[in-house]
Every structure is written in C-alpha cells, then in structure tokens.
Image: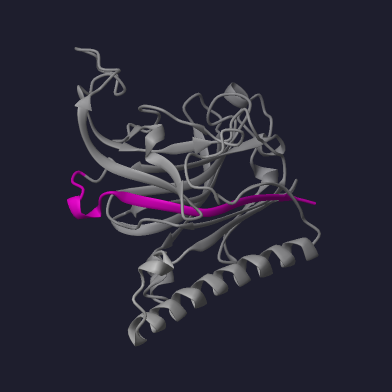
Amino acid sequence: MKNLKDWKYNEQSACSLMCVMYIVVAALTCSIDAAAQTTAEGWRLVWHDEFDTDGRPDSTKWTYERGFVRNEEAQWYAPENVFQRDGHLVIEARPADFPCPTYQEGSTQWRHNRPRILWTSGAVVTKDLFSFQYGRVEVCARIPVCLGAWPAIWLLGIGGGWPACGEIDMMEYYQYEGRPTVLANACWAGDTMKGTQWDSSYTPLTHFTDRDPAWASRFHVWRMDWDEKAIRLYLDDELLNEIDLAKTINGRLRGTGINPFHHPHFLLLNLALDTRIKHYAPADFPMRYEIDYVRVFQK
C-alpha cells in the first residue's frame, strides 16, 4: 500500500483510501476469525510464519533450493528471487540470460546440457529445520494463473527417496489437458521400481472464476487436515480431495511396505515454469507468487 503521505486528499483519494482500509480490515478479520475457529476446534498453533518483516525469509525457518532441481523444469532456482515485502513472502520468476554454472559440454543430462540460464525463480523449504506428523496446515496465498505458471504448496517425507518418502500437494496449479487447473494430490511408491501411485483431484480454474471473476486477484486459503486415517485438502473450505491412508502403502521393492504418511513431512513453497508450455508471454514477467502466512496446528 502507498505511504499515506503520498496521497493527495481529495474526494477520489478519500474513497480509494476507504476501500483500501476496508480490504485490510476485512483481511485481518478473516484471519482472526479463522484462527479463533481453529483454536475452538481444539487445534494448537505449533509453527508459523507471518512474513511481517521486509527482507530475507527467516533463516531459522526456511532454506533455499538452488539451481535446476526437478522435473526438467525451465527455471534456475536462486535465493534472490525470494523476499519478504509488505507482509508477504514473494517468490518471483524472471527472464534471465547468463552462463549456466553446471553446464557440461556434450552432456545428455538435463541439469548439465543447458549452456545458458534463461529463467530464474525461487523455492523455499523447511527441510532440516521443521517437520511434523499429522496436523492442520493453512497457507494463505495469491497465485499467478498466467500460461506457464506452476506454483505449489507441498510436503515431502523426511526419510527415503521419492516417491517412497511420500508427497502431499496441498496446491499445484498448471495447464492440465489444455486448461488451467488447480490440483490437490498425494503420491507414494508403487509395486515396481518405476511405479508411482497417485491420488489426485483436478479442478478447472473456471470452477472458481465462474463464481468470482476476480478470483485470481485475491488471496485464498489452502488447508490440509492430516491424521492417521486420512489427508483432506481444501481450498477456501471447499474439500478438493480426501486421501484414504489405508491405501497409501508403499510397494515392497522401493518402499519396504511402509506407509509414508504415518511419518513426518516438511514444507515446500515454489514457483516453477511449466516446460510443456513452449513460449511464455513477456508481459507476464516478473511473475509473482505471494504468500500471506503459513500456519501449522496440531491437536
């Protein structure tokens, strides 16, 4: 929000200021009401970040992913693409053009066969700093919905390789079968060395924007309720997916028959660029993924 001293007081500005104040008060009231409801339901806040201080993310809570990390994605993860401003954590994807530090001439490996970095973005994780088993997670965020955007709120188990460690995607957003889609998933190891079992839901973005054309401009609350029986994934209190943990047993070849969702997980927030989209629109950059808060509760 602009500094108030920069406003010229006139009827239009006064109206604008009143609108801004209304939005701020409404957001605070919503946050307070949600927190009160959660407390009333018997949850206790055990970890959180409100991102209230401008600058770098809290190093006691978050570390960075760096470089080319997974999925043959287009972006190079860099810490400078993640910062806190005006009460939000901002993850920003940007165009770039500089030599790739990991390039190896003649390599066929995707992390090493790109001579130049053309895109950068950011990812933060709580690995080795905070993990938990069972509870409620609430993340209030505003996501980019332009072509090629791939924001996510997700968790990984702290032990074993993927997918036997277990993955929970509270939120993914990307183009699925040619249309913008919000996903809510979990995966674990299948019965073969290459097999992965998924329990996924796919909700077209139009499901939300038909009800609210301004949906993409607003912050929304993604929530996970996780106990020994199920993982339930919500968006603004609407249940998107319920994963029955009686069915999430790893295959014997890789996961030794354990259930990864009965073990601790850590949090990840990132903005990737979907390489299935061959051309990104310059007007969409810098592309911003903004997080208002992350809160973890337990009974």
Residue 237 place in picture, x, y as percent: 60, 67
Is residue 18 shown above or below 244? below
Q: Is residue 179 left or right of residue 58?
A: left
Residue drawn 60% across and 36% down?
61
The quadrant in which residue 245 appears is top right
Magenta span includes 295? yes
Is residue 237 shown above or below 265? below
Residue drawn 79% across and 65% down?
40
Q: How is the image coloured?
A: one colour
Judge whether residue 134 can be spotted in this image: yes
Q: How many marks?
A: 0
Residue 271 place in picture, x, y as percent: 39, 44
Question: Which residues are drawn in magenta?
Answer: 278-299
Toward the viewer: 62 or 249? 62
The quadrant in which residue 145 appears is bottom left
Q: Is residue 72 left or right of residue 62?
A: left
Residue drawn 67% across and 70% down?
33
Identify the residue at the far bottom of this view: 11
The quadrant in which residue 138 appears is bottom right
Is residue 223 shown above or below 60? below
Judge whether residue 207 can be spotted in this image: no
Q: Is residue 98 left or right of residue 72?
A: left
Magenta span includes 50? no
Q: Is residue 16 left or right of residue 154?
A: left
Toward the viewer: 22 or 38? 22
Residue 158 place in picture, x, y as percent: 63, 29
Toward the viewer: 47 or 239? 47
Residue 205 place in picture, x, y as percent: 39, 64
Residue drawn 72% across and 45% down?
134
Toward the viewer: 289 or 83? 83
Which quadrant is the N terminus positioned in? bottom left
